């Protein structure tokens, strides 16, 4: 797939079924993530994969966090089932390091770029996905259950699989309202 065609037509898809990427294709997806821009070459990334049965482990973690907030049973069950919306979920974590020239924001942005690169690589390989966060990404209980350090931040959960139905092609956006030529 042509790079510009990919960038100009990319879209997410929340309706995902088997198959998820595996083997060499999944490796290619990780390699794309590892090419993310990275100030100071800190490699501040971790990709935690939940596939097949392991998705229920993530579901339990999300359900426990929801229960700890005192939510209703229906909300807890919704959280438990959330990871089952795709055959694979990858939690993308910014492993933020102490650095005098590279603040936390830059490392989190780098992890976000890694997530986007993995999503684009997935599209190029014929898969689809969606970047999700929600309060889970910021919850200490979820972080602890995933053995994250205090300084880590989940930048997103990349849901991956094969599009069940094609999404509607979105209209092209006019760049003009978003662009300002300074000094003109
Ligand atoms: C940081 C971040 C967090 C997001 N979190 C969610 C989310 O929790 N749930 C959701 O439905 N979409 C979320 N989105 C938006 C989707 O990933 C997607 O971009 C949106 O549905 C628009 O679709 P499109 O990518 O095809 O334009 C998030 C996007 C970003 C960048």
Image: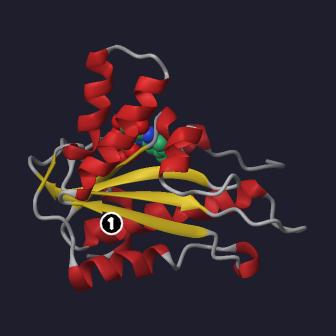
Task: Give x and y (percent) for residue 107.
Answer: 69, 62
Image-quadrant location for residue 78: top left
Image-quadrant location for residue 94: bottom right
Q: Image height check: is 141 above or below 164?
A: above
Instruction: Decide if residue 11 is on the left or right side of residue 41.
Output: left
Task: Give x and y (percent) for residue 32.
Answer: 43, 77
Q: Residue at x 40, y 33 (%)?
A: 64
Image quadrant where one finds the N terminus = bottom left
Residue lying furthest right: 100
Task: Give x and y (percent) for residue 128.
Answer: 23, 58
Q: Residue at x 32, y 20 (%)?
A: 75
Rendering quadrant holding ligand 1: top left
Task: Give x and y (percent) for residue 80.
Answer: 28, 35
Q: Residue at x 45, y 61 (%)?
A: 116
Q: Disc 1 beta carbon < 8 A from ligand 1? A: no
Q: Crowding at label 1, few (<14), some or many (≥20) Cα neighbours within 10 Å?
A: some
Of the pair 88 and 109, the residue shown nearer to us: 88
Q: Image height check: is 172 above or below 112?
A: above
Q: Which color scheme does this rendered protein use?
A: secondary structure
Instruction: Decide if residue 17 is on the left or right side of residue 101.
Output: left
Residue lying furthest top: 72
Instruction: Decide if residue 152 is on the left or right side of residue 2.
Output: right
Q: Residue at x 42, y 27 (%)?
A: 66
Of the pair 55 and 123, the residue shown nearer to us: 55
Q: Which residue is mark 1?
A: 6
Count of residue discs: 1
Instruction: Decide if residue 157 is on the left or right side of residue 14.
Output: right
Q: Circle 1 sits in a helix, a strand or a loop, which is it? A: helix
Of the pair 120 and 78, the residue shown nearer to us: 78
């Amino acid at each position: 797939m042509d790079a510009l065609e990919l960038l100009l037509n990319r879209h997410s898809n929340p309706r995902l079924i088997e198959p998820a990427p595996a083997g060499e294709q999944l490796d290619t997806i990780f390699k794309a993530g590892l090419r993310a821009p990275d100030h100071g070459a800190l490699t501040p990334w971790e990709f935690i994969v939940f596939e097949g049965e392991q998705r229920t482990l993530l579901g339990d973690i999300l359900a426990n966090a929801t229960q700890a907030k005192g939510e209703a049973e229906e909300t807890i069950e919704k959280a438990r089932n959330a990871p089952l919306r795709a055959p694979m979920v990858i939690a993308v974590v910014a492993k933020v390091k102490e650095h005098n020239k590279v603040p936390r924001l830059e490392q989190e942005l780098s992890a976000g770029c890694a997530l986007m690169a993995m999503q684009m690589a997935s599209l190029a390989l014929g898969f689809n996905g969606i970047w999700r966060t929600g309060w889970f990404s910021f919850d200490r209980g979820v972080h602890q259950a995933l053995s994250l350090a205090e300084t880590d931040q989940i930048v997103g959960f990349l849901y991956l699989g094969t599009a069940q139905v094609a999404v509607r092609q979105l209209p092209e956006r006019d760049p003009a309202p978003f662009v300002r030529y300074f000094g003109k």
